[in-house]
Image (spheres, rainbow, N blue to C red):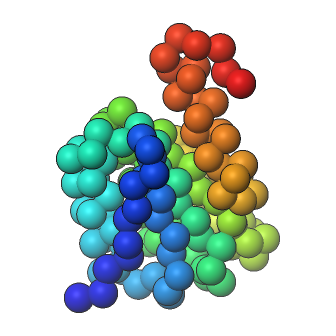
Amino acid sequence: MERIPVLKMGDCLLVSIQVDMHDRLAVALQDDLTSKISSSRARGVLIDISALDVVDSFIGRMLGNIAAMAQVLDARTVVVGMRPAVAITLVELGLELPGVKTALDVEKGMALIQSALAGANGRPAA
């Protein structure tokens, strides 16, 4: 079965979705990510969706579910690289993604995660 790689970078996990998402792949990603967050004790999850042209309601809900599960496991989630058409579709579908922060690119997304983690550790955010 096809899998999306989950890379560890410091105390964060990086996921770059480079293939068209289908329902089974989204569920597998959710399972892989929650297992990896738990086993690696990651504090942040960055999901790059810049290669996705389309996000349907199921994939949108899965992103929200991943963020909620990550939060329960004490990790922050940031989705980066959202194309305007994807943002429009999510809004038109009425999908709210509670717990999901967004950033324009990977660099800004990592900065957002690091800032959130610094604030959670009682240090002033940079």
Q: Residue 82 occupies which quadrant of the picture? A: bottom right
Question: Is 119 in front, or is 8?
Answer: 8
Q: Does residue 71 appear to the left or right of 81 in the view shown?
A: left
Q: In the image, is residue 67 above or below residue 27? A: above
- Residue at 21% from the left image edge and 47% from the top image edge: 39
Q: In the image, is residue 110 above or below residue 90? A: above
- Residue at 65% from the left image edge and 73% from the top image edge: 50
Q: Does residue 49 appear to the left or right of 62 in the view shown?
A: right
Residue 61 seen = no
For the C terminus, the image quarter is top right
Residue 106 seen = yes
Q: Residue 95 occupies which quadrant of the picture? A: bottom right
x and y percentages locating residue 86 in the rendered image? 68, 72
x and y percentages locating residue 17 in the rendered image? 50, 75
Question: Is 107 in front, or is 93?
Answer: 107
- Residue at 65% from the left image edge and 14% from the top image edge: 124
Question: Is 108 in front, or is 20?
Answer: 108
x and y percentages locating residue 4 in the rendered image? 38, 76
- Residue at 57% from the left image edge and 76% from the top image edge: 55
x and y percentages locating residue 54 in the rendered image? 61, 82
- Return the residue found at the far top: 122
Q: How many marks?
A: 0
For the N terminus, the image quarter is bottom left
- Return the residue found at the far front: 10
